[in-house]
Image (spheres, rainbow, N blue to C red):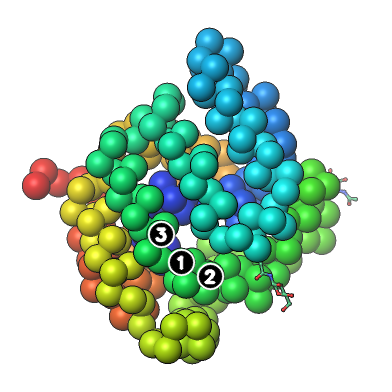
Amino acid sequence: MRAAAGLIAVAALAVLLTPHPAMAQSAITGLCDKDPELAEISASNPAVAQCCSQFDALLANIDAVLAQGVTALVPVMSCTLLPPVELSQECYQDLLSAGANCYYETNVMIQFFNETGLLGTAVDASKTGEVSNETVASLPTEAEFKEQALAYLPTAKSNLKAMTGSDTMNPICCNTIGKLIEDKCACEEKPITFVQSRLDKVGMKIEDWIEFGKEVVSGMGCDSAQDLQAYPACTKP
Ligand SMILES: *[C@@H]1O[C@H](CO)[C@@H](O)[C@H](O)[C@H]1NC(C)=O
Ligand SMILES: *[C@@H]1O[C@H](CO)[C@@H](O)[C@H](O)[C@H]1NC(C)=O
């Protein structure tokens, strides 16, 4: 679990792993067609259009992505440099580094989504384009989700130990999370505005996840997320 490892990375994963049906709906292939802002930009920017088709291809083959883990996302990571996201080069490098160094930690997070059934729901939704009403009714609320995730921490630690021999986050992963926060990557206006405007549609606010993110990261034995801030609530260095 590393919910604070760059809200941008999490947002990208959220499209794949989201527990929320409305987000799952938007994850169905045709990303640019369904998103008016992306549709407009991609019409005049071939690189953005190319990113949209790469992303659609990933979602169409979601089982392969899950089998491969975060490395499957590397080809689309550079898309975060393009409009409308326009992540800085520095934060893009930080993100790649976190992805590469937090491999097992990410697997533990995917296991959590799998064991709660949320992963299956998101995968089904991305395949069929539909989420049944019973499924919607069974999804946890934000408060329930946070409670479930925190209660899962001991399991997450023992799962991590089974993979790495240690029940705490590896120090390099912890450092890369620290670097993302030190570089104020979640304070960059365009990327966060982009993510937040999509989350608005499902009533999620990034600011409501900051404390939770810190708690999860510190629960995994890493202290480097304590200064996490997100746009617009960022203090000057
Ligand atoms: C999810 O759990 C099932 C059953 O334990 C397992 O077969 C599957 O590989 C898991 N999927 C992922 C992506 O971890
Ligand atoms: C599911 O819920 C929607 C919205 O409340 C409703 O319009 C629809 O009829 C429901 N579908 C079924 C199969 O119950």
Name the spot of residue 169 as percent of width and height, x first: 36, 77
Query: Is residue 19 in sight in this rendering?
Result: no
Position of 36 relative to 156 (above/below): above
Residue hosting label 2: 107
Residue farthest to the top? 44
Indicate the quadrant where residue 161 lies: bottom left
Left or right for 156, reference 177: right
Query: What amino acid is labelled 1 in the image?
Result: Tyr
Of the pair 142 and 68, the residue shown nearer to us: 68
Instruction: Identify the secondary structure beneath mark 1.
Output: helix
Instruction: Identify the secondary structure beneath mark 3.
Output: helix
Residue hosting label 3: 100
Total labels: the figure holds: 3
Name the spot of residue 198 as percent of width and height, x first: 52, 37
Binning the other alpha carbons within 10 Å of mark 3 as few (below 14), some (14 to 19) or many (20 upward) gives some
Q: How far apart are marks 3 and 1 (CA)?
A: 6 Å
Residue hosting label 1: 103
Binning the other alpha carbons within 10 Å of mark 2 as few (below 14), some (14 to 19) or many (20 upward) gives many
Whether label 2 lies within 8 Å of ligand 1 gets the answer yes
N-term-proximal mark, 2 vs 3: 3
Query: What amino acid is labelled 2 in the image?
Result: Asn
Of the pair 226 and 138, the residue shown nearer to us: 226
Binning the other alpha carbons within 10 Å of mark 1 as few (below 14), some (14 to 19) or many (20 upward) gives some
Of the pair 88 and 71, the residue shown nearer to us: 71
Picture quarter with ligand 1:
bottom right
